[in-house]
Amino acid sequence: MSRFVLDNSVVMAWYFEDEANDFTAAILQSLASSEALVPTIWPLEVANVLLVGERRGRSTEARTSRFIALLDALPIRVDAATSQHALSGILMLAHEQRLSAYDAAYLELSMREGVSLATQDQALRRAAEACGVGLLVA
């Protein structure tokens, strides 16, 4: 089974239809035969985006619950070692690539695991390219 790192920018496009595109649909489809890796911050990022979406009237609690059930059914593995790298590799990458620590966590995980990255974030894409990390494309 192939593996890749999945950035939250792709995941949330599955939830908000106005952010969906062919790339995000292809990534979701690829999970039928692949496993996605995410850093330990990912569940908090998802929860926050869902909560803000509800508060801004873009969604409802019922829809959020259905989406969480979908995520739970997908082969998404949370990397338990992310926090061990937060004050070293992740912080260093954030400095070097001018990323947030959150975005650098996805990049560091891709580098550490030697797998490609799926993201819609342009700054993260540029940093991945600069670091020699492969990017998934539609």
Image: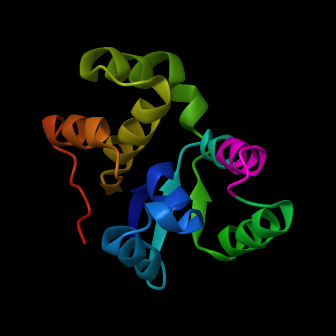
Residue 7: image location, x then y, percent: 45, 51
Q: Residue at x 59, y 65 (%)?
A: 15
The quarter of the image holding the C terminus is: bottom left
Q: Quadrant of residue 131?
A: top left
Q: Main secondary structure of the magenta part?
A: helix
Residue in the picture at 72% in, 60% down: 59
* 65 left or right of 101 in image: right
Question: Residue at 60% of width from left, 30% of height from top?
Answer: 83
Residue 82 left/right relative to 69: left
Q: Position of residue 52 (x, y in %)?
A: 71, 42
Q: Quadrant of residue 40?
A: top right
Residue 72 vertical position relative to residue 40 in the rendered view, above or below: below
- 105 lies above or below 121: above
Asked if residue 86 shows in the view, the reply is: yes
Question: Residue 67's spot in the image, x, y percent?
Answer: 71, 69
Q: Is residue 50 magenta?
A: yes
Region rendered in magenta? 47-58
